[in-house]
Amino acid sequence: MLKSIDQTRIILVALLAVSAFLNYLDRQALAILASPIQADLNITNQGYAFIVSSFLVAYSAGNLICAWCIEKWGVRIALPVFVLWWSTANFLTGFATDTNTVAATRFALGLAETGGFIAITVMAQSSFKPSQRALVIGCCNAAAMIGATVSPPIIAWLYEIYGWRMAFYSTGLLGAVWTLCWVLMFVRNADKSDLSYDEKIDEQNTSTDQSRDDSPVSYLSVIKNRKAWAIVFGKMLTYPIWFFYLFWFPKYLTDERGLSISELGQTVWVTYLAAAVGSIIGGMASGLLIKRGMVPQVARLWILAFVAVVGTIGIINGFEPPIIISIAVASFVAFVQMFWQINIQVLSTDIFGKRELVKVISMGAIITSIASVISNTLVGSLVETISYRPMFIVMGFAYAFAFLIVYLLLREPKSKDSSAD
């Protein structure tokens, strides 16, 4: 499928993928080093929950800011600003001295990191065909998962040799290198690198939503659009699952299951590698269905239905199986979670025009972040008072509930004429 993409777009995908890789490498540093940082800075579990919630609150608010930046400056200028901002915030985490300073730097990180994924989705729609978009987003998501995969061993190694502060210094500096590469390729030579894609001349576009247009839209009109709420609920009910596996699952393995930081670095990466593989396969799956003649929206829904059925396997972890089983189950959940995330995201590009798309994505991310803050706070309280079991059970049924809502909201309501005898 990538053979039909020209060289400039291949470089574009590569740089977008690296930005997603850095996004998760910087994000995961805190989760991997949570235990030693808590011990060194006297941070309680509720304090850690406050830090994670600070990130999520900023991630939510950042959607409005980043969406405005993309509309105002264009994605070519906005993306490097986002990357440089969050890399600086990650670097500054190494100077933290208590709960509040860690929370402040992670808040700054969250403000910009959300913009990276909005930019990727906008680029996928504006520069690639409908049958290519899921794979493009899948490649970028896979890169993010690779970042999550390699972060445990790399950060654990940096911690063992240099201490936890150096992990933030070294990973934070990588963003400056990426920014320089992007500016040289797509900002300085903007006139020589045409990335626009005209859907009107693509015969495959006949199978996409014909009601979309690129005229200016307001957030109010998006709020009134039932299809926009399909995307919002599809994310809101399932993305907190991924945040759990990012921020709490490594802690679960060290605190509840007794793994050391070294053992964590040797094992938990498998979960994130599975997510990387799921990103690619999940992106290819709907693309192949489209190439076989299926309408894009229907192809995405078939993938979501599959996840709704098999995602229930995550409930097993609520009963504390052997470590190897626990990691295997988490890896499978992460694998199919990416099927869901890729296809619910690219579904929005099938339905909405360019101007509407940015607002739908940002609205969805804001509400999803709020839901994630609530679930994160709940996890923190449950960990202190009960256990992780309730969360594993609830997450197991979340996909089926989310699919039902997405399906009902996307289904066209019957007109009065058609319902009359």
Image: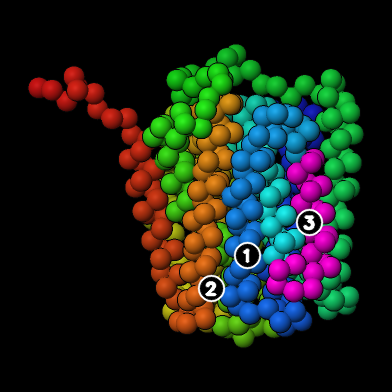
Mark 1 vs 2, N-terminal side: 1
Q: Nearer the viewer, residue 123 or 366?
A: 366
Up-down: is 173 above or below 67?
below
Q: Alpha-carbon neighbours of circle 1 within 10 Å: few (<14), some, or many (≥20)?
A: many
In the rendered image, residue 50, in percent from the top left (x then y), is placed at: 61, 68
Up-down: is 320 above or below 121?
below
Residue 203 is a magenta residue:
no
The type of residue carrying mark 3 is: Ala
The type of residue carrying mark 1 is: Val
Up-down: is 87 above or below 392?
above
Residue under label 2, please give it. 380
**Based on the displayed image, in which of its 4 quarters is residue 64 positioned?**
top right
The magenta segment: 80-101
User: Which disc number belongs to residue 52?
Assistant: 1
Tell me the SS state at disc 3.
helix
Query: What is the basis of the colouring in this image?
Result: rainbow
Give the side of residue 274 with respect to residue 38, left or right.
left
Q: Distance from label 1 to label 2 (Cα)?
A: 10 Å
Tell me the SS state at disc 1.
helix
Tell me the SS state at disc 2.
helix
The type of residue carrying mark 2 is: Gly
Residue under label 3, please give it. 89
**Based on the displayed image, in which of its 4 quarters is residue 76 positioned?**
top right
Up-down: is 58 above or below 320?
above
Q: Distance from label 2 to label 3 (Cα)?
A: 24 Å
